[in-house]
Amino acid sequence: MTPLIDILSWISLLVGGAFIVVGALGLVRLPDLYTRLHASGIIDIPGAGFIVLGLALQAGWSLVTAKLLVLMLLIIFTSPTATHAVARAAMHMGNRPRLANTEVEPSKR
Amino acid sequence: MMFATVAVAILVSLALVLSRAILGPTVFDRVMAANSVGTLCVLLLAVVGFLNGRPDFLDLSITYALLNIIGTIAVLKFFRFGDLGHSGDGPTS
């Protein structure tokens, strides 16, 4: 483990942790379901991506890196699917997004 | 050291997301928070595996990720259509 790889891995882990905390804060603070879906995406893609990248840099070329790659691929495919399912179910149940200009009738879809 | 820092960050985020799951106004907020809890749980398992020097925990992480997506889709389908065997309502809906 060269020091350069080590430092890169630490930076990646710290950036991923910061993204995760920011996403969780947004999940608490944002005003609407659809904006909170954006915060959930922040947790899933950049946060998990940077943390998995840091762990893969720590692991080196081995089976562990392959497992981390499979894990990240799974998260990349399933997170937008879940977000889309939540948004579609919410729209189907009549949960409209909050708009800045409230006089205009919200568009159908 | 760095793994412990990331584990603490993930635990703090878990507390925040759980607060959203408890006081979310609609059921969709709760489902979304449950999905985020699943993702954070996967990451926490991976980081704790590295923290203890046992990266075999990654297998558990992959299993949790698979269970997470199935649970989210099943709950949403149940709340939308009323049963799990519904075939959906076409591409235009």
Image (cartoon, coloured by chain):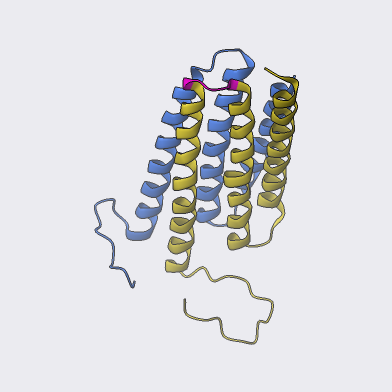
Chain colours: A yellow, B blue
Main SS type for the magenta part? Answer: loop
In the image, taking residue B43 as reference, residue A66 lies left or right, namely left
Q: Residue at x 58, y 56 (%)?
A: A37
Residue A96: image location, x then y, percent? 54, 71
Residue B22 seen: no
Quadrant into which the N terminus of chain A falls: top right
Residue B14: image location, x then y, percent? 64, 36
Residue B34 within the segment the image draws in magenta: no
**Residue nearest the observer in this picture, A76 or B12:** A76
Residue A39 seen: yes
Residue A41: image location, x then y, percent? 58, 51
**Residue nearest the observer in this picture, A61 or A11:** A61
In the image, taking residue B92 as reference, residue A45 lies left or right, namely right
**Residue nearest the observer in this picture, B20 or A59:** A59
Q: Residue at x 63, y 62 (%)?
A: A32
In the rendered image of this protein, does residue A64 appear above or below residue B88? Answer: above
Q: Residue at x 47, y 76 (%)?
A: A109
Residue B6: image location, x then y, percent? 70, 29
In the rendered image of this protein, does residue A108 appear above or below residue A72? Answer: below
Query: What segment carries the magenta color?
Result: A59-63
Q: Residue at x 58, y 62 (%)?
A: A34
